[in-house]
């Protein structure tokens, strides 16, 4: 009789352990799904924050050369810099996929060729923009991040 009582106690303990283990696994599974959803939501927020910096150029028709140089500088500061291209009316393209074409000399040349001219009139000497650009295209990579912006001369 004593052996039967001990067998019932052992069986009850095993069943209780299995029940506690099942509850633990269920809680873990339900919470891991929630953590994955939160991680996905945060990466969506970060993606939107990253893209919003560059999406201000989308659809613009009055971009000036100073803004393009600022965009190049900003994109070079990012870990995964975006490519910035400028197509002139003559068909020349400035920029490339890894942005090595946008070194200091190239930027200085671009600014001197495309930014300002000195105008003398009755009010004195002033500088004015001679070129404006239109956003030609914005391309996204497979993760949804902007990877390339192209402008063309207006």
Image (cartoon, rainbow, N blue to C red):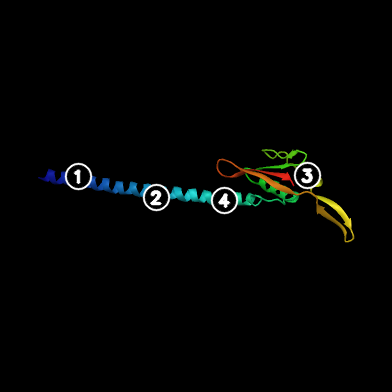
Instruction: Give x and y (percent) for residue 117.
Output: 84, 51
Residue at image x 30%, y 46%? 22
Going from the N terminus, do you reach mark 1 or mark 2 first?
A: 1
Report the disc number at residue 110: 3
Q: Mark 4 or 3 closer to N-term?
A: 4
Q: Position of residue 107 (x, y in %)?
A: 76, 44
Do the numbered discs 3 and 2 sit on residues whose CB atoms are within 8 Å?
A: no
Q: Residue at x 35, y 50 (%)?
A: 27
Residue depth check, mark 3 versus mark 2: number of the one nearer the observer: 3
Q: Mark 4 or mark 1: which comes first in sequence?
A: 1
Q: Is residue 118 left or right of residue 5?
A: right
Mark 4 Cα shell of 10 Å, populated few (<14), some (14-19), many (≥20): some
Q: Can residue 81 be seen at all in this image of the molecule?
A: no
User: Which-is-in-front pick, marks 4 and 1?
Assistant: 4
In the rendered structure, which disc, 3 or 2, sits on the residue that comes first in sequence? 2
Which residue occupies 58% across, 45% down?
145
Say whether residue 23 is left or right of residue 150.
Answer: left
Residue identifier under label 2: 31
| Distance of label 4 from label 3 (alpha carbons) | 30 Å
Kindly report which numbered mark, 2 or 4, lies closer to the viewer in this rendering: 4
Q: CA distance from mark 3 to mark 1?
A: 83 Å
Label 2 to label 4: alpha-carbon separation: 26 Å
Residue 123 placement, left or right of 142: right
Q: Are marks 4 and 1 in contact (CB under 8 Å)?
A: no
* Quadrant where the N terminus is found in the figure: top left
Q: Which residue is mark 1?
A: 11
Give the crowd class for mark 2: few <14, some 14-19, many >=20 residues within 10 Å.
few
Q: Which residue is mark 4?
A: 48
Q: Where is residue 6, by image quadrant?
A: top left
Q: Crowding at label 3, few (<14), some or many (≥20) Cα neighbours within 10 Å?
A: some
């Amino acid at each position: 009789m004593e052996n039967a009582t001990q067998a019932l106690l052992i069986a009850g303990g095993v069943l209780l352990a299995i029940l506690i283990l099942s509850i633990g696994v269920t809680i873990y599974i339900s919470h891991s799904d929630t953590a994955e959803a939160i991680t996905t939501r945060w990466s969506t927020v970060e993606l939107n924050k990253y893209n919003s910096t560059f999406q201000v150029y989308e659809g613009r028709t009055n971009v000036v050369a100073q803004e393009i140089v600022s965009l190049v500088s900003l994109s070079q500061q990012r870990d995964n810099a975006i490519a910035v291209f400028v197509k002139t009316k003559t068909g020349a393209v400035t920029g490339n996929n890894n942005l090595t074409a946008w070194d200091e000399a190239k930027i200085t040349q671009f600014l001197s060729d495309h930014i300002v001219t000195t105008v003398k009139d009755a009010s004195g000497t002033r500088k004015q923009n001679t070129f404006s650009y239109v956003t030609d295209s914005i391309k996204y990579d497979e993760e949804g991040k902007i990877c390339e912006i192209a402008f063309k001369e207006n």
